[in-house]
Structures are given as C-alpha cells and as structure tokens.
Amino acid sequence: MQTGIPAGAKQRKVWTRGAINTVLSLYALVTLYPLIWLFISAVKSNEEFYSRPFLLPTVWKWDNLVRAWKVSGMGLSLWNSTVVTVASLVLTLILGALAAFIIARFEFKLKAFFTGLFLLGMLIPIHSTLVPLFIIMKKVGLLNTYGALILPYVAFELPLAIFIVAAYLVSIPKEIEEAALIDGTGYWGIFFRMMLPLSVPALSTVAILGFLRFWNDFAFALVFISKPALKTVPLSLSAFATGYMTDYELTMAALAIAVLPTIIVFLLFQEQIMKGMTAGAVKG
C-alpha cells in the first residue's frame, strides 16, 4: 500500500503556490512602483518629466541630485531634522515606556481615568492646535527653536506610545516581576533590566511610527520655524516651487534624497515592528 500525497494533489499545491506568489509579486510591484517612479524621475530633465513621465530617461541627469542638495541646503536641513527627530524619539520612548509600565503593571486608584485620558489624546486633531500652540510658544519665546517642534511632537505621540507599549507589557507574565522582587530587585531595576529589554519590539514600533511623523511633518515646521538656519527637510523641499512654476527635476531629486533615511530606518526595524504589532494582541 502506497502512502504519501497523490500526484494530483501535489500538482494543485504547486499551481496554488505559484498563483499566490504571482499575486504577491504583482502587489509588491504596485506598492513599490511610486518609489521606483520617484527615483527614475529624479534623474530626468523637466522636458522628459512631462513628455515621458512613465518611461526611463534618455539621458540620466545624475547632476540633479548634486544641484538639489546645494540649492535646497539639504545638508543643513537633514541635520535639523535629525536633531529634532532623535530628540523627540528619545523623549517619547522614555516617557511612554515609564507611563506604560505604571499602567500595565500596577493597580491604583484612578487607573482607568488616566488610561482613558491618555487614549483621549489620540482623538485630538493635531493640526487644530496650531493656532493656540503658536500663541503659547510666542509668549514663552520658543518660536524658531528646536523646542518648538520637539515638545509638540512628544506630546502628540505619547498617547500612541503608551497604548502600544502598555498592550505589550500586559502580555508579559507577572511571575517574572514577582521573582525579581523576591530576589531584591527594585522597581527601577525591574523596569530598566527586564521590562525595557523585553518591550523592544513594541518600542521599535513606536520608534518607526514616530520617526515617520516627525521626519515628514510640514505644518508644524512651517508655522513654528521661520529662520532658514533651522528649516527641516520638508521645508527645504518647498524651495523648488513658486507661485508660478515648479522645478520638477530638482524637486524629485530632493525628494529622492529625503526619502532615503525613511527607507533605511524601516529596513533596519521591520522585523521588530512586525513583532510589536502582533505580540501585544495575544496574552502569554
């Protein structure tokens, strides 16, 4: 008596797998095409951008990248965006992890109130606060400083950070914490030596989401920053557009440069992001 999978079933399995791979490949191509189109357009002339928008350039103008870097002052803008983004991320991760640790691992009065208060922050339309924030920052002298961007970024990202990290910390067994307390480890030790390392997937998720928001923000930087020396990457990209025309060859080249850090960060943290998005959904 023969055992194993029949030949017909094997054939169907191969065809099914091939169909799935084909669909996924087409989906990946459709998803990545805007990015591919951006990099192709970055080395085209303005004439070819209009006449051959979806075709490869006849002449690859690599000097577009150099000219875009110089005209927009991209070096200074990248530095400013890096300072603002890194500072905002560090504060968001530290404060968010501390608040999430308290909410997820402790029982106290008004816990539900504070949890709801943090979650309520996720419902506030960010751009509706531009005018009151501008008035406050003008009075306290924070306009045209890094703090004018860092403080609002942290405030608006904290609710999401607390929500993600707290959901992840809840899934960690209480026995780990109890064993550490028996061994004489204090709460600060439990947080820094145990909870913080264990919550790296959730923190990575918060980091990438925060990075995308901070790095790409235009509205806050436009309203709160007017000094050319403090302009961020989104502000530098507006240098190629006037009320009458847009220099698309330099605009696309500058966009190609500006998007590279985002791609690099996502590739570095993609595994941790997937873990952080799914691990907190199932309690262990």
Image (tube, rainbow, N blue to C red):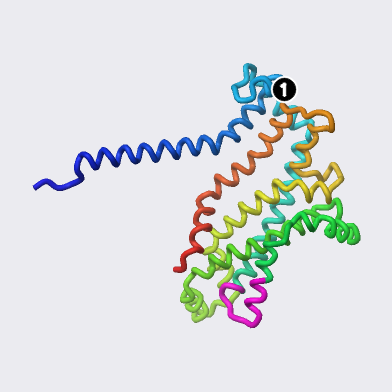
Q: Is residue 43 above or below residue 144?
A: above
Q: Secondary structure at mark 1?
A: helix
Q: Position of residue 19 (x, y in %)?
A: 38, 37
Give the residue displayed 83% in from the left and 59% down from the top: 133
> Magenta: predominant secondary structure element?
helix
Marker count (numbered): 1
The residue drawn where x is 20% and y is 39% is 7
Measured from the top left, where is residue 185 in percent x and y? 54, 77
Residue picked out by circle 1: 46
Three-letter amino acid code of the residue under disc 1 = Asn
Residue plotted at (80% across, 53% down): 146
* Residue 228 on the magenta segment: no
In which quadrant of the rendered image does the C terminus lie?
bottom left
Quick one: which residue is furthest to the right in this view? 139
Q: Nearer the viewer, residue 97 or 135?
A: 135
Is residue 31 toward the left or the right of residue 123 in the image? left
Residue 34 in the image: state x and y as whole percent.
60, 35
Q: Residue 274: x, y in percent?
A: 51, 53
Residue shown at 60% from the left, 71% from the top? 101
Residues in magenta? 103-116
Q: Is residue 152 above or below residue 62?
A: below
Local crowd at mark 1 within 10 Å, few (<14), some, or many (≥20)?
some
On screen, 188 above or below 215?
A: below
| Residue lying furthest top | 58
Instruction: Name the foreground residue: 182 vs 161.
Output: 161
Left or right, 259 with reference to 69? left
Name, please, the residue furthest toward the left: 1
Would residue 222 appear left or right of 160 to someone viewing this image?
right
